[in-house]
Amino acid sequence: MFIGHFAVGFGAKKFAPRTPLVLLLAAPLLSDLLWPFFLQFGWEHVRIVPGITRYNDFDFHDFPWSHSLLMSAVWATLFALVYYGLARYRAGAIAIWIGVISHWILDWITHIPDMPLFPGGGPKLGLGLWNHVAATMAVEIAMFLVGFYWYWTATRSRDRIGTYACLVYAVVLLILFIGDRFSPQPTSVKDIVVPGLIAEAILLIWPAWFDRHRVPCSESV
């Protein structure tokens, strides 16, 4: 799951309009934000296994600290508590908590059975949507369009940055998602760590910028 996670963050703005978009996006992306660091530190591991799914070649055999259901609940609670302690905005804290947990749920739908329930062993789950390429792309694109529409209609632009930087961002995400499917698969784990960290920074700084140029529809421009 890629832009499906972004869909959750965009859509959450409808229910927590006072929370900055960057935080609403960081919540469903949090597991993937942590993952490259945990790979780099050697706390988690991934293998490249050509053909393991029809959609990509990643064997996620060891990532319990960033992607298990139990740790997702821990990260969700910590994120939501810190946010609530600073903002005192209950709707935003709830949206952040649900957003973090949604990552496990969406990955459970897309992954083959490799999603851990908790660190240290136990069953691994996954419905295997990645074995159906067209369905994977259709589901993610549909989710993203709905989530982005909710954000777009729940906010209004203050200026051109709020309009065009936002629209371009959505188009870029769609291009990245579609282009990634038809790009060569990485040949080593090193090929995904550094690009992943760079992409994380760009894909969060950009919406933090244009969201400041949009306001909830309930507020005046």
Image (spheres, rainbow, N blue to C red):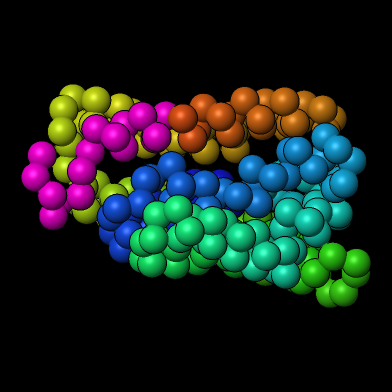
Q: Position of residue 115 (x, y in %)?
A: 75, 64
Farthest-out residue, left: 220
* Residue 145 x, y percent position in the rendering: 34, 50
Relative to 66, is 2 on the left or the right?
Answer: left
Residue 218 magenta-highlighted: yes
Q: Is residue 159 left or right of residue 55?
A: left
Which of 54/202 is in front? 202
Q: Is residue 100 visible?
A: no
So how many labels did they put on this image? 0
Residue at horizontal 67 percent and vertical 26 percent from the top = 195
Q: Magenta residues, as a range?
A: 206-221
Residue at position x 56%, y 29% in the image? 201
Vertical relation: 74 (above or below) 138: below
Q: Position of residue 177 (x, y in %)?
A: 52, 38
Q: Is residue 27 magenta?
A: no
Q: Quadrant of the C terminus?
A: top left
Q: Looking at the image, which residue is at 66% across and 30% down?
A: 197
The relative height of residue 189 versus residue 148 in the rendered view (above or below) is: above
* Viewer-closest of 101 and 47: 101
* Closest to the observer, 172 or 23: 23
Instruction: Give residue 156's quadrant in the image.
Output: top left
Residue 45 is left or right of residue 205, and the answer is right
Q: Position of residue 189 (x, y in %)?
A: 83, 33
Work out whether residue 93 can be spotted: yes
Q: Residue furthest bottom?
A: 123
Residue occupying the point 77% across, 71% down? 117
Is 54 drawn above or below residue 189 in the view shown?
A: below
